[in-house]
Image (cartoon, rainbow, N blue to C red):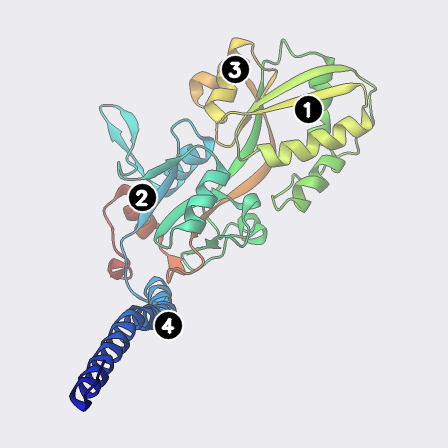
Amino acid sequence: MKITNKKILAATLSLGLILAGCGKDQKAEEKPAKTETTETAEAPAEKEESTKTANQEDYDFSVVSREEGSGTRGAFIELVGIEEEVDGSKEDMTTQEAIVQNSTNGVMQTVSQDTEAIGYISLGSLNDTVKAVKIEGVEATEENIVNGTYKISRPFNLAFKEAEINDLAKDFLKFCLSEQAQTLTLEEGYVPLKDTEKYEPAKVSGTLTVAGSTSVTPLMQKMAEKYQELNPDAKIEIQSTGSSAGIEAVIDGAADIAMASRELKDEEKDKLAVEVIATDGIAVVVNPSSKVEDLTMDELKQIFKGELRNTSELGK
């Protein structure tokens, strides 16, 4: 078969066109990869901008509160002035938009994860996952609670039926008021009692049920551990159920001693005797990245009532 120069030229041109097309398609396929690389490189800049917003710009408060029946909530609303007289009785005016948590740990976890959150916890539970806010320029410390400059503080109470408690309950109460127990109180960051006496083990036995406040629970666990070391035949069962639930349990006979992180109500005092085992501050906490450092009592009240919503309204 005779091949002419024209046919060779045509074949050469066709092959060139095919190769050019392949090269073009290959470049088109490579383009998305380049775009993906560019987007990945920009991600850190977006993250940095988000952090800057959390640290510096104004934002709406995300209020975090304890549940109804909590001793911490009861003390907080009373001390800060968040309850109002309605039809002859006091009513809790905490904003309906509040995020409600049923434990100290729940509040701390929520605040640590939400840059706009504000809540309140027992001072003894404070750690570096949250930031404590000054109130009227005063830090929440044991020293400031003792000297009276930090205003948001409350007693840790143990309540019981005085006529019905057994020897084990009497001895445990004696220990909680002792020098050894109050040393634990100081070590755990609470304000201890003064003029205490050294406890001598009574060698009692049996099981004691202590129920109530989640705020008192950490201190009570330490006291129970030490007491059981001194009295190996005694067992202290602790139920962290909330102040009001613990008080009801003792009144109903389901527990021996109630832990309460608030003052008892008049109707509760008619049925139970009370011993104060420590004083605790209530720390107002925000996310560590929050711009909020100091609040007045009035600002704090307005925030938790839902009347002051944005950080731009502070100081006015």
Q: Quadrant of residue 85?
A: top left
* Quadrant holding the C terminus: bottom left
Position in image of residue 152 (x %, y %) = 45, 45
How packed mark 4 is, by other alpha carbons closer than 10 Å (few <14, some 14-19, many 20 or more), is few
Q: Above or below — where is 31 with respect to 286? A: below
Label 4 vs label 2, nearer the camera: 4
Q: Earlier in the sequence, mark 2 or mark 1?
A: 1
How packed mark 1 is, by other alpha carbons closer than 10 Å (few <14, some 14-19, many 20 or more), is some
How far, Cα to Cα, is label 3 from label 1? Answer: 18 Å
* Quadrant holding the N terminus: bottom left
Position in image of residue 33 (x %, y %) = 33, 69
Label 4 vs label 3, nearer the camera: 4
Judging by the rendered image, the residue that carries numbered circle 3 is: 249
How far, Cα to Cα, is label 4 from label 2? Answer: 42 Å
Q: Above or below — where is 316 with respect to 184? A: below
For the point 58% across and 50% down, which residue is it? 142
User: Residue 41 has which mark?
Assistant: 4
For the point 58% across and 53% down, which residue is it? 143
Foreground pick, 251 / 65: 65
Position in image of residue 201 (x %, y %) = 82, 25
Regarding mark 3 in the picture, which secondary structure is present there?
helix
Label 2 vs label 1, nearer the camera: 2
Left or right: 50 in relation to 113 = left
Which amino acid, mark 4?
Ala
Position in image of residue 314 (x %, y %) = 28, 59
Judging by the rendered image, the residue that carries numbered circle 2 is: 304
